[in-house]
Image (cartoon, rainbow, N blue to C red):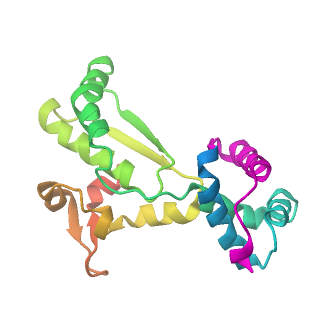
């Protein structure tokens, strides 16, 4: 039955996109119509609903608050991993950090990782900042990491990663800032002193 439900129509997509933007400030482009359709189809199946319109009525109605949480998780979940945007981290290390330390000497630096997903970005930033201390001297910093999804924030707090999530971490960095996880074979856990900065 659910395989018979096609993609969202442009009108349905626009309605969902406006709804998403109003609640999360995420601007979905029409190229994402198939992706959103596939993700919503799974929710239709889980709830035994027959149409996208029926699902929209649920999440936008007074009785849909709990499903709204699931909906936002489905919409905002993306693949993320360490060292995904190396150019950004190079810029942080070589340009942004020295500039901040010049402009705010002796002050605690604060960073915000909005939409942090499962934590790779904020931990990656923390590692780069600690590495930066080798060149600039010691400074204090804190990273605030937020996401719409409570589920991914729980994952981020655990700071346990394996497989593709850690494949791009340079080996010396992996040895220096991660420890083999004693509870999960094949996993690495971010060092406590790095986790405390996030």
- Report the side of 4 relative to 146 (left or right): right
Identify the image quadrant of the N terminus.
bottom right
Q: Nearer the viewer, residue 8 or 174?
A: 8
Q: What segment carries the magenta color? A: 1-29
* Residue farthest along the top direction in this orientation: 103
In percent of width and height, residue 65 lies at: 78, 62
Reply above or below: 122 against 74: above
| Left or right: 60 in relation to 17 | right
Please report the residue visible at 64 percent of the width from the left and 45 percent of the height from the top: 30
Q: In the rendered view, would you say 113 is above or below 94?
A: below
Residue 22: x %, y % from top left:
73, 42
Magenta part, dominant SS: helix
- Identify the image quadrant of residue 102: top left
* Magenta span contains residue 50: no
**Which residue is depicted at the point 31% across and 54% down?**
82
Residue found at x 74% / y 66%: 67
In this rendering, position of residue 80 left or right of residue 86: right
- Name the image quarter holding residue 170: bottom left
Q: Is residue 112 above or below residue 186?
A: above
């Amino acid at each position: 039955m659910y395989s018979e439900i096609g993609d969202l129509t442009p009108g349905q997509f626009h309605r969902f996109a406006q709804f998403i933007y109003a609640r999360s400030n995420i601007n979905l482009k029409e190229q994402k119509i198939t992706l959103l359709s596939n993700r919503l189809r799974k929710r239709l199946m889980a709830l035994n609903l027959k149409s996208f319109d029926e699902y929209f009525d649920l999440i936008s109605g007074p009785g849909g608050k709990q499903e709204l949480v699931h909906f936002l998780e489905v919409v905002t979940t993306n693949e993320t991993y360490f060292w995904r945007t190396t150019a950004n981290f190079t810029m942080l290390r070589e340009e942004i950090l020295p500039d901040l330390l010049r402009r705010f000497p002796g002050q605690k630096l604060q960073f915000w990782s909005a939409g942090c997903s499962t934590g790779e970005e904020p931990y990656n930033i923390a590692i780069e900042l600690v590495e930066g201390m080798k060149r600039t001297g010691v400074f204090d910093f804190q990273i605030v990491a937020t996401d719409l999804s409570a589920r991914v924030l729980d994952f981020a707090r655990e700071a346990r990663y394996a497989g593709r999530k850690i494949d791009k971490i340079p080996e010396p960095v992996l040895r220096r800032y991660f420890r083999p996880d004693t509870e999960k074979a094949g996993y690495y856990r971010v060092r406590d002193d790095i986790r405390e900065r996030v």
